[in-house]
Amino acid sequence: MGLLSRAALTTAGAFAALILLFLLSLLTGRVWLPPAQLIHGLAAPKPNLAWLILSELRMPRAVLAGLVGAALGLSGAVLQGLLRNPLAEPGLLGVSGGAALGAVIALYFGLSAHFALALPLMGLIGALGACALTLSFGQGGTLTLILAGSAVSALSGALLALALNLAPSPYAAYEITTWLLGSLADRSWDHVMLAAPFILVGWVLLAMTSRALDALTLGEAQAESLGVNLNRVRLLALVGTALSVGAATSVAGSIGFIGLVAPHLVRPFVGYRPSKLLLPSAVLGAALLLFADIATRIIPTQSEMKLGVLTSLIGTPFFFWLVVRLRRTAP
């Protein structure tokens, strides 16, 4: 079977899993409704209880899970190709930390209490600010970009810790901590409409890097000799990541490991050409986050488990396995 056929089959399989998980997400919730009742609610006069649960609670949550997961998976695949680093993911360049810091500022100063969408808006502003810092200090090559991103991540982490330390009340500290754990609970169509345009624009920018990423597998000097503008590629990748992952983080909180895991899961089936990796990584990222979000609702805990906690519990063993594998294969 040719590589193209394997890539197409992998993408089709990921799409099938995504559709199945999306439908399952609509049927899953803390309040159990039989599938027959939900289907009847679609045809019955509206509004009715089943229709309201589907349209106002579960549908926006499922759509947002797909958008956020795809943004994380696609950006992870692009950054691994750009930096030629199998451990690269959106948090490496400070974007996730910047988005989290912006959202925490909205919580700290009480902006979210006066304006419901202040939290996601400030999260997006924080992501773009982190991107600007990383770009301004990361001129000069891949290593410089990684170091600049690490510095921005460290700065964001320090300021987050400071906000927790100086929280004006225990309730504010609890609210900040809860948001940082990541969740899609209680998200509405307003969150979807706010995040979706930025995520979609980010996807377009990230997709524009595909040919350059293929050339970069030969090395930066060889890519430049083929006519690749490295500064343009870095700008597209960073701004695309800032828009898509920043918007995702601003509405869902910190969600780790999806951007790292998704590209590695599909790479054995599609090969090591970065352009072939982008679409299946995005689709699988969406499926993985939907699966994790469904799990948070069915795991029997007193209160719903936070999504970021579950993805970290699942992703950390994979990360250790990846490190061990790289150590074994390293020269």
Image (cartoon, rainbow, N blue to C red):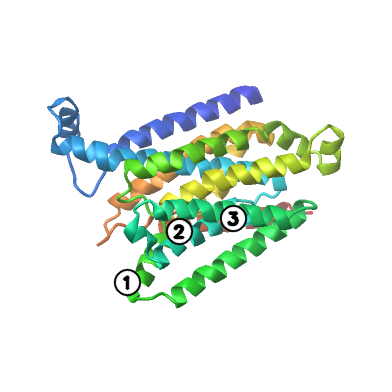
Residue sitting nearer the eye, 15 or 127: 127
Residue drawn where x is 43% and y is 45% of the image:
289
SS state under label 2:
helix
Query: Badge 1 local density, few (<14 within 10 Å), some, or many (20+)?
Result: few
The percent position of residue 239, horizontal first and vertical second, equals 62, 44
**Residue 180 got which mark?**
none
SS state under label 3:
helix
Tell me if residue 81 can be seen.
no
Query: Badge 3 local density, few (<14 within 10 Å), some, or many (20+)?
Result: some
Q: Earlier in the sequence, mark 3 or mark 1?
A: 3
Q: Quarter-wise, where is residue 32 in the image?
A: top left
Residue drawn where x is 39% and y is 31% of the image:
19
Residue sitting nearer the eye, 157 or 119: 119
What is the distance, in whole Å, between disc 3 and disc 2 at their CAs? 13 Å
Residue sitting nearer the eye, 138 or 38: 138
Q: Is residue 314 above or below residue 23?
A: below
In this view, the mark in front (3 or 1): 3
Left or right, 172 with respect to 278, comes to left
SS state under label 1:
helix
The percent position of residue 268, horizontal first and vertical second, equals 62, 37
**Residue 129 got which mark?**
3
What is the distance, in whole Å, between disc 2 and disc 1 at their CAs? 16 Å
Q: Earlier in the sequence, mark 3 or mark 2?
A: 2
Three-letter amino acid code at the position of disc 2: Ala
Three-letter amino acid code at the position of disc 1: Tyr
Q: Earlier in the sequence, mark 2 or mark 1?
A: 2
Residue identifier under label 2: 103
Q: Work out which quarter of the rendered image holds the N terminus and state it.
A: top right
**Residue 171 got which mark?**
1
Left or right, 198 with respect to 92, comes to left
The percent position of residue 7, horizontal first and vertical second, equals 59, 28
